[in-house]
Image (cartoon, rainbow, N blue to C red):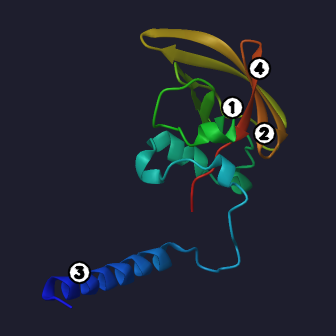
Amino acid sequence: MSRPEKFLIAAAAVLSLLLAGCVAQTKPKSSGSGTPENFHSLMPPKSLLRDDTIEAASHDRATSRLAYVGVWARSGEACAMMDQTAFEGFAVITPATLRRSDETCTFDQGEPEQGYLRFEASCKAGRRTRARELTVYMQDAEKMQLGIDGTARSLTRCHLPE
């Protein structure tokens, strides 16, 4: 065997070992947990999200008992776009604010442990501020109906990746 052939064989062997190591490192660890239940509604990592999105998503609802607080989107798939691109059909809700694609609203914090809430909000879109009526109907911990001036939309809770 010639010297160049030996070099190519050795290089191929080293390359295959390196690639095998890369593949082995990307296999999921067998922690027993598998795929998270909420994988379909995960948002991008915190480092790519706005401050109010992180605040809403990491809010301790068990302590505040404000079920409406969170990050919501029209579908689980839309959660992956949160704060990455402009799209319709999401709401970032803290105890006293709501941000949508075209406006930000402020309101008095709702009563704890309520499945239906109505808020009188002051909403700003660009330079324009106007009064709006917000309604929240919690269908369960992961789904809500958000109404704005009588027009309601179903939303799904988005989750932070762990």
| Residue depicted at 52% across the width and 20% down the height | 103
Q: Is residue 102 above or below residue 80?
A: above
In this rendering, which labeled residue sits more in front, label 2 or label 3? 3
Task: Say which of marks 3 and 4 sits in front.
Answer: 3
Q: The residue tagged with tag 1: helix, strand or loop?
A: loop
Amino acid type of the residue that numbered disc 4 sits on in the rendered structure = Ala
Q: What residue type is labelled 3?
A: Leu
Going from N to C along the chain, the mark reached first, 2 or 3, is 3
The residue sitting at 61% across, 30% down in the picture is: 90
Q: In this view, does 80 lie to the left or right of 63?
A: left
State whether residue 53 is above or below residue 119: below
Q: Residue furthest front?
A: 1
Residue 8's tag is 3
Disc 3 versus disc 4: distance between alpha carbons?
66 Å
Indicate whether 121 appears above or below 116: above
Residue at 68% from the left image edge and 49% from the top image edge: 40
> Alpha-carbon distance for marks 1 and 2?
10 Å
Quadrant of the image for the N terminus?
bottom left
Report x, y in % for residue 146. Answer: 74, 26
**Callout in the foreground (1, 2):** 1
Residue 11, horizontal then vertical, whole percent: 25, 82
User: Contact (CB < 8 A) between labels 2 and 3?
Assistant: no
Mark 4 sits on what residue? 152
10 Å crowding of disc 2: few (<14), some (14-19), many (20+): some
Q: Which mark is residue 143?
A: 2
Residue 74, label in figure: 1
Mark 3 or mark 1: which comes first in sequence?
A: 3
Q: Which of marks 2 and 4 is nearer the N terminus?
A: 2
* Mark 3 residue element: helix
Q: Is residue 4 visible?
A: yes
Helix, strand or loop status at disc 4: strand
Residue 69 visible? The answer is no
